Image (tube, rainbow, N blue to C red):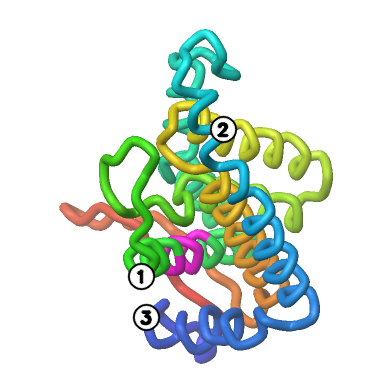
Amino acid sequence: MKENLKTLEPRNFWEYELKPTIVNSFDTGGQMIFLSGALSVAATKQYDRTIYLHNLREEDKWMDSNVADIGGYLGSGGPGIAIAVLQLALDPVNGVAHSKALMLTAATHITTAFVVNRERPSGRDRLSFPSGHSSSAFATATSLAYAYGYKAGIPAYLAATFIGVSRVNENIHWASDVVAGAALGIYWGRAAALNTGKSFMTVLPILDGETRGLSLAMEF
């Protein structure tokens, strides 16, 4: 057993976790998510400007800006990362899956945003498509749904939907940006959940003299 316990080095994590997830992600289920997401984005895009103009009027907004700010915080990535870190300590296999989902979602979101170069409704920058907040939130929701079933999945998806709506409410994103982000998060959340288990991660505290930190080890 001890000889099979390897330090969690980047090349091991890539070989045993990230690579299989990426390679196997575009199966029949992944293709269906991709296609339905693309069609939903195309359909929603027709109403982007209508929704944008609606939300210019403060009295017509779906929610108060202070409430929307809560959605902005929840979808910032911090809460999702915190949940993943807690899982790594208490439920390592699902923690690895969640961590992979967040990593792959973030990498895809950032790359796509720079390539598409879509201007935000507010004109702040040209990184509107897809919504990072929405993609991160739906990646977390999907990961939790696969890990713990509907009791965790339903509230997580409701929270993710609230986060997405809050971004549109404040004209930070077009509605189609949020739909694309949701599809992206669901895609990688599912792929990560279905391609985890080839390794087992343990997270242990290090308390050695002046050294403080965490030790990560993976069994293959």
The answer to whether residue 11 shows anywhere in this view is yes
Per the model, the C-alpha gap separating discs 2 and 1 is 25 Å
Segment colored magenta: 102-108
Residue in view at x 59 percent, y 50 percent = 45
According to the picture, the residue beneath numbered tag 2 turns out to be 51
Q: Nearer the viewer, mark 2 or mark 3?
A: 2
The answer to whether residue 213 is above or below residue 35 is: above
The answer to whether residue 164 is above or below residue 63 is: below
Element under label 2? helix
Per the model, the C-alpha gap separating discs 3 and 1 is 27 Å
Q: For residue 22, what is the image quadrant?
A: bottom right
**Quadrant the N terminus occupies:** bottom right
Q: Nearer the viewer, mark 2 or mark 1?
A: 2
Q: For residue 66, what is the image quadrant?
A: top left
Residue in view at x 73 percent, y 77 percent = 31
Query: Along the polypeptide, which appears first: circle 2 or circle 1?
Result: 2
Amino acid carrying label 2: it is Ile
Amino acid carrying label 1: it is Val
Residue in view at x 56 percent, y 14 percent = 60
The answer to whether residue 141 is above or below residue 52 is: below
Q: For residue 219, what is the image quadrant?
A: bottom right
Q: Which mark is residue 10?
A: 3
- Viewer-proximal residue among 158 and 147: 158
The answer to whether residue 108 is above or below residue 122 is: below
- Viewer-proximal residue among 52 and 65: 52
Query: Along the polypeptide, which appears first: circle 2 or circle 3?
Result: 3
According to the picture, the residue beneath numbered tag 1 turns out to be 115
**Quadrant the C terminus occupies:** bottom right
Q: x, y percentage for residue 110?
A: 37, 63
